[in-house]
Amino acid sequence: MQETEVLEGSEAVAFAVKACRPQVISAYPISPQTHIVEALARMIADGEMDSEYVRVESEFSAASVISGASAAGSRSYTASSSQGLLLMTEVLYASAGMRLPFVITGVNRAISVPISIQVDHQDTISLRDSGVIQFYVESSQEAYDTHIAAFKIAEDPGILLPVSVCMDGWILTHSYERVSFLEQEEVDRFLPPFKPKNFLDVNDPKSWGSYAEEDVLMEFKYSIHRAMQYGKERIKEIFSELATITGRDHGGLIEAYRTRDAEVILVAMGSMVGTIKEAIDKLRSQGQRVGLIKIRCYRPFPFEDILDNIKVAKVVAVMDANFSMGSEGALGMDLKAKLCGRRGAPLVLDCVAGLGGREVNEKRVLEIVERAREVEESGLPLDEPYWAGLRPEILPEGAENDRQGKIG
Amino acid sequence: MKITLGAVVKGGTSLNYKTGSWRDQRPVLNIELCKACGVCESVCPDGAVHLVNEAYRIGYDYCKGCGLCAYECPADAIQMVAEEK
């Protein structure tokens, strides 16, 4: 019988991390991530957990500490948000290159400027090319379960990459939900101690991340990509192995929700997915054939699984809580790149939704579905992404020639 | 040579990695002019100049062609010539 409690999402993550027995944790405070490392500090201080807790002077150091600890053969963990994750960027690219399998909770928060503490996915999306595996979760329970899987995935000998579990700031980290916990023995059986083949050893000196000339660097990068591609199958196996223990199956790389006969399929990730499911249930009860694909694993990008579930769709509406200035959102770009040139591919409607904490409620989802129906009718994609809920009336002078959301 | 996971290499193995291919200027030592003073050996950043049987030799497996030896040689015994590949 699993123990169930109502508790803060941050605390649920801290319990998951504790159960994974990391030997080294580095910590630097930044909202909305802080409660996770605070809870871990308390567990260590109270003697409930045995781990080296390193308080550092910046996120650059937080990432460097767990990178070094991981190279020394220790299971390692940290968490950060927003500007903190950006400051880690250089170290994360290097850590992926050195194939160091630590776990980071990326608590999602907007990037300055304007300064904001509200949620969107710009921070972790900015790290998408680093070689770090990225999961996004919908609930505190999924955050708990995914952290336990994350260590096993990172440390898989065929993968050996850092893993970031991304969870929406505040909405998940600071709200109270029911979470069921595994017994320590169950986690220990699922996740054996970290025993890497290579580790820093004074009796057998080795150097990590050495110099590479133009004749070999491409092969290094290609081998990281290969590990990600191999990971697509392995991640699904590990998720389903965990599901047999927990009795909770959150899906594989994606979760397909009512997509089988759907003409319009929304694609989203993170906590907004719960709201979208409610909206879809409502539309379904009115006879509309609408579905959802929730992206659980963003890197590696689960294109094959998405394709399997959008075969009969006419329009796929992607809801990106991130934006590449001068272009469009990341999920939309990824999906279209893979769909391009495929016979019978659905049209893609790019939507920007939930930037800087802008609420994604049922009304907004219904608007997006309506917009998707217009695209379906016209048979043409939009020139520009649709910024859901944008308030053009507050734009500064000179921005009036805004043509977002116009068809053709 | 096979690449390793994480670019991990054993310590003390730098001699296995021949860096002479970087060179586009080759130092050529005229042994007739050389006074065997050793200035070239002391300024070479790669440790590529060695005394072999009382005569200096430049090791082209590691020399990157920086030209310090030619610049410092008091006897002008070293000329830099373009490397042809």
Image: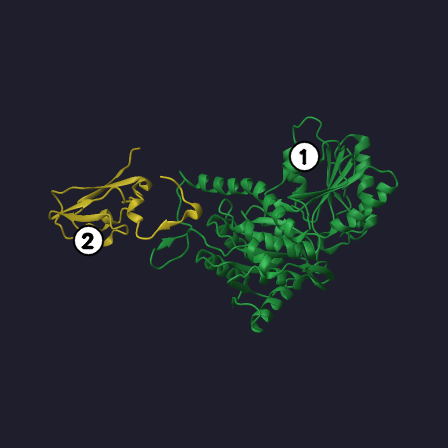
Circles 1 and 2 on the same chain: no
Is A337 left, or right, of A347 in this rendering? left
When the figure is inspected, residue A103 is found, relative to residue A277, above or below; the finding is: below
Point out residue A300 in the picture as x, y percentages from the top left corner.
59, 43
- Chain identity of mark 2: B
Quarter of the rendering containing residue A284: top right
Tag nearer the camera, 1 or 2: 1
Q: CA distance from mark 1 to mark 2?
A: 68 Å
Residue shown at 27% from the left, 45% from the top? B62
Q: Which chain is green?
A: A
Q: Residue furthest right?
A: A286
**What's under tag 1, amino acid-wise?**
Leu
Q: Confirm or deny contact between disc 1 and disc 2 (CB under 8 A).
A: no
Residues A11 and B66: in front is A11
Q: Residue furthest bottom?
A: A46
Q: Quadrant of the C terminus of chain A?
A: top right
Q: Which mark is residue A307?
A: 1
**What's under tag 2, amino acid-wise?**
Val
When the figure is inspected, residue A38 is found, relative to residue A372, above or below; the finding is: below
Instruction: Give the class, few, some or many, for how many residues have Cα within 10 Å of label 1's Cα (few <14, many ≥20).
Output: some
Point out residue B72 in the picture as x, y percentages from the top left corner.
22, 51
Q: Quadrant of the N terminus of chain A?
A: bottom right
Residue A55 visible? The answer is: no
Residues A355 and A224: in front is A224
Residues B65 and A173: in front is A173
Q: Which chain is yellow?
A: B
Q: Which residue is mark 2?
A: B39
Instruction: Give the class, few, some or many, for how many residues have Cα within 10 Å of label 2's Cα (few <14, many ≥20).
Output: some
Query: Secondary structure under badge 2?
Result: helix
Residue A26 visible? The answer is: yes
- Chain identity of mark 1: A
Is A368 left, or right, of A103 in this rendering? right
